[in-house]
Image (tube, grey):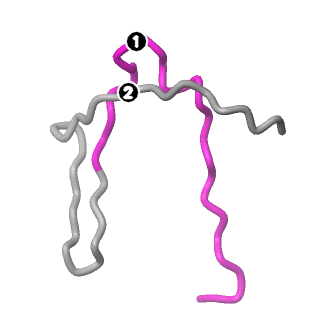
């Protein structure tokens, strides 16, 4: 990895598509537009898959 800082991108929120908040757990999930203000597609950034916790059931 080269750890070179890259220019930020802005992707507008789209709460009509998805919005969930939980005050007790102190989190909110909001959908974002698939295309940034500058035309960059969100797919350019890839994904970070969730890794299941082992030993907890």
Q: Which residues are magenta?
A: 30-57
Contact flag, marks 1 and 2 (Cβ < 8 Å):
yes
Asked whether, in this view, residue 35 is left or right of residue 30, the answer is right
Residue that mark 1 sits on: 38
Which class describes the residues within 10 Å of circle 2: few (<14), some (14-19), or many (20+)?
few
Image spot of residue 19 (x, y percent): 21, 50
Q: Residue at x 54, y 24 (%)?
A: 7
Q: Quadrant of the N terminus?
A: top right
Residue 54 magenta-highlighted: yes
Instruction: Determine the CA span between mark 1 and mark 2.
Output: 8 Å
Q: Residue furthest right?
A: 1
Instruction: Please determine whether, in this image, residue 39 is positioned above or below residue 10.
Output: above
Which class describes the residues within 10 Å of circle 1: few (<14), some (14-19), or many (20+)?
few
In this rendering, the count of numbered labels is: 2
Asked whether, in this view, residue 47 is left or right of residue 34, the answer is right
Residue 56 magenta-highlighted: yes
Q: Residue at x 27, y 60 (%)?
A: 28
Instruction: Please determine whether, in this image, residue 41 is positioned above or below residue 31.
Output: above
Q: Residue at x 75, y 38 (%)?
A: 3
Dividing the picture into quadrants, the one containing residue 29 is bottom left
Residue that mark 2 sits on: 10
Dividing the picture into quadrants, the one containing residue 23 is bottom left
Q: Residue furthest front?
A: 5
Image spot of residue 26 (x, y percent): 28, 73
Which type of secondary structure does the marked residue at label 1 adopt?
Answer: loop
Q: Residue at x 23, y 34 (%)?
A: 14
Image spot of residue 49 (x, y percent): 63, 52
Which type of secondary structure does the marked residue at label 2 adopt?
Answer: loop
């Amino acid at each position: 990895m080269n750890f070179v800082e890259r220019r930020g991108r802005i992707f507008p929120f789209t709460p009509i598509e998805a919005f969930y908040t939980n005050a007790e757990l102190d989190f909110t999930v909001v959908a974002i537009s698939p295309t940034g203000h500058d035309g960059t597609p969100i797919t350019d950034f890839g994904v970070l898959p969730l890794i299941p916790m082992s030993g907890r059931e």
